[in-house]
Image (cartoon, grey):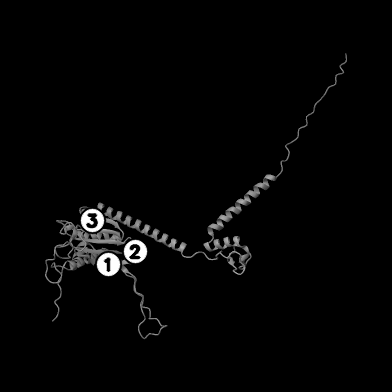
Amino acid sequence: MENNQPIIVKRVKRFGDGHHGGAWKIAFADFATAMMAFFLVLWLLSTATPEQKIAIAGYFKDPIGFSESGTPYIIDLGGSPQLAPEKTINPEVKSEPTPDTSIQLDQDKVESMAEQVERERLELLLQELQNKVEENPQLQKFKDQILFEITQDGLRIQIMDAENRPMFDLGSARLQPYFEDILLAMADTIKAVPNKISISGHTDAKPYAGTGDFGNWELSANRANAARRALVAGGYPDSQVARVVGYASSSLFDRANPLNPVNRRIDIIVLTKKAQRSIEGEQPQPTAPEGAPAGSAAPAPAPAAPPTEPEPMQPRELRQKLNIFEDGVLKMDEPKQ
């Protein structure tokens, strides 16, 4: 029996993925261009001066009021936009920034940063001096007589007398050997900073036992000067000494006990720049001699040779040169009749 049932064959046609188009590329290119323009604007704002920012803001507020300054563009390397007062429709727009306010703030900030750096330098110097006292066996036994502190004028180094360990001979400016060693050890460390120093001498309230016009004022000043000579002999530049002064008993360390030995002391202050300017003051400008023509100037002096720092000397070699008060009291010349 014949089978006449038809045979149906289904053929499935397969096609590859279709092309989705390039619209995304255009969108991505627009996004990249916008980001580039955004970062260019940020860069221009960060590099523009205050005057340029005010000029740009004025342009967008009143484009008609700006005249061409060499080029029709808003920002130009060869010039900057300028206001045209006769054309402007926005009279409150200013072409110049408000002066002095931002500049003054910048100067204050710079001075504050300079003072902070100077204070850190003095704190490092204080730490170094303390380490030198702790590490030096000769200085360690005198550490109770040496005080360090940071004040508004700078780093203060106070070297005080003890009951049985005075810095000077009684009633004179003759240095004791241990005090010379302290000053010589400190000279090399103090000269490492560019700040100048102030040296002051102090006595207790006990009246001077000598005769004549020589008293505690002269004694304290001579002791301060003897300390200066010791520092200079140890290698400290003499030009870095801003002041040497004697206070006698007018500035006691222990006011409750004016006869306390700690009142006899030498103060060495590593000055801040502000304190140094206060001490030195403004130097007067040289004036032309009388009779000189108004347009002529005095001849410039010949340049001086640069000062050379003296070589440090050993303590034993200094004693004969530093102690000029061999007999205790300074001998004053008798006035001629």
Which callout, 1 or 2, points at the residue further toward the start of the chain?
1
Tell me if 86 is positioned left or right of 318 in this view: right
The residue lying furthest to the bottom in this view is: 291
Q: Residues within 10 Å of mark 3 (few under 14, many from 20)?
A: some
Expressed as whole percent of the image width and height from the top left, the position of residue 181 reads: 22, 59
Q: Secondary structure at mark 3?
A: strand
Q: Secondary structure at mark 1?
A: strand
Going 34% across and 57% down the picture, which residue do you hit? 119
Which callout, 3 or 2, points at the residue further toward the start of the chain?
3
Expressed as whole percent of the image width and height from the top left, the position of residue 48 reads: 54, 60
Query: What is the C-alpha distance between the residues marked 3 and 1?
Result: 21 Å
Q: Residue under circle 3? A: 146
Q: Residue under circle 1? A: 243
**Taking 244 as reference, is 37 above or below it?**
above
Q: Could you say which disc has been placed on residue 274 in the image?
A: 2
Give the amino acid type for the residue marked by disc 2 in the picture: Lys
Q: Secondary structure at mark 2?
A: helix
Give the amino acid type for the residue marked by disc 1 in the picture: Arg
Name which quarter of the figure residue 152 lies in: bottom left
Name which quarter of the figure residue 20 lies in: top right
Query: What is the C-alpha distance between the residues marked 3 and 2?
Result: 25 Å
Name which quarter of the figure residue 92 lies in: bottom right
Query: What is the C-alpha distance between the residues marked 1 and 2?
Result: 15 Å
Q: Viewer-proximal residue, 303 or 280?
A: 280
**Taking 229 as reference, is 124 above or below it?**
above
Tell me if 325 is positioned left or right of 270 in this view: left
